[in-house]
Image (tube, rainbow, N blue to C red):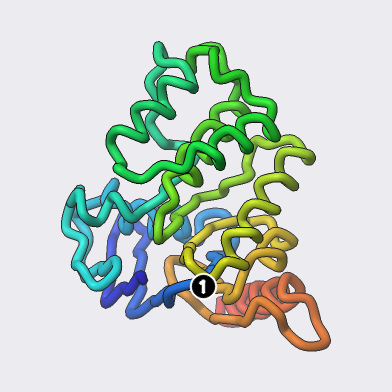
Amino acid sequence: MLKIRALRKRQGDFVLDIPELSVTPGTFTVLAGDNGAGKTTLIRCITNFIRDYKGEIYVGGTRYTGFQKEVTARLGYMSEEMSLIEELTAAGHFTLAQALSGRWNQTICDRLTDQLNLDARKPVRELSRGNRVKLGLIVALSREPDLLIFDEPTSGLDPVSREIVLSELKRKKGSRTVSALISTHLLQEAEVIADEIAVMRAGKIIARLPGDIPGVSAGQGVLELLKQKGEDDCSRS
């Protein structure tokens, strides 16, 4: 569903360097790593918010070179930086997303709006940070995309809302009809939703781990890798 080849992007002293990354149909890959590891930069390249990168990105076999309608219609994107129209209500965003996407599941929209206790009558300017996150998640999930691309999807949510969102992602994962690339620094979330965890450090993927590691939590496996890399860096300095 998603293939990345020879992706490279320099931002000052930081270099994102991803020789290859694939998300196969029906699977969930989680990007895990320290702050500044490159998770958000990678997602911004994939979603074309960063365009001056080198390399190739394919979605469903089509090379993604811009905001191609046939590709964007298959994506469900959400991040803290996503654009919302301040004067438009949440309900207005639902109507707009439905018109633009061509795919919409009103049942999912109504259920999540109710479960997450989002007042769809309020304009965005009156929504708290957490409620803006809820709105973005509801829009992305209600579009019934083939590929979810989420950057820290539960950041800013209260514990109850976080659990509701994770349950919805587990439901999507269980259907095996949706693929996902999700970044998070919360390793307990990675354990819940990942088929595979891609561990990032300093702009590179340093390891790829199964979401279920026999005899050890996946989160602990990620921590050990990051600690090991940090100790190696110190020993070389």
Front-lying residue, 131 or 198: 131
Q: Which quadrant: the C terminus?
A: bottom right
Q: What x and y, as percent, mark residue 77?
A: 41, 47
Quick one: which residue is furthest to the right in this view?
215
Q: Residue at x 52, y 59 (%)?
A: 182
Q: What x and y, as percent, mark residue 101?
A: 31, 42
| Left or right of residue 231, residue 180 in this image | left
Q: Residue at x 35, y 58 (%)?
A: 13
Q: Residue at x 41, y 20 (%)?
A: 92
Q: What x and y, as percent, mark residue 231?
A: 67, 77
Quick one: which residue is furthest to the bottom in this view?
214
SS at mark 1?
loop
Q: Is residue 12 visible?
A: no
Q: Which quadrant of the figure has residue 170?
A: bottom right
Q: Which residue is mark 1?
A: 27
Q: Which quadrant: the N terminus?
A: bottom left
Q: Residue at x 35, y 64 (%)?
A: 15
* Image vertical order of residue 211 relative to residue 160, above or below: below
Q: Is residue 218 visible?
A: yes
Q: Amino acid at mark 1?
A: Thr
Front-lying residue, 72 or 211: 72
Q: What x and y, as percent, mark residue 114?
A: 67, 30
Q: Which quadrant of the figure has residue 41?
A: bottom left
Q: Which quadrant of the figure has residue 193?
A: bottom right
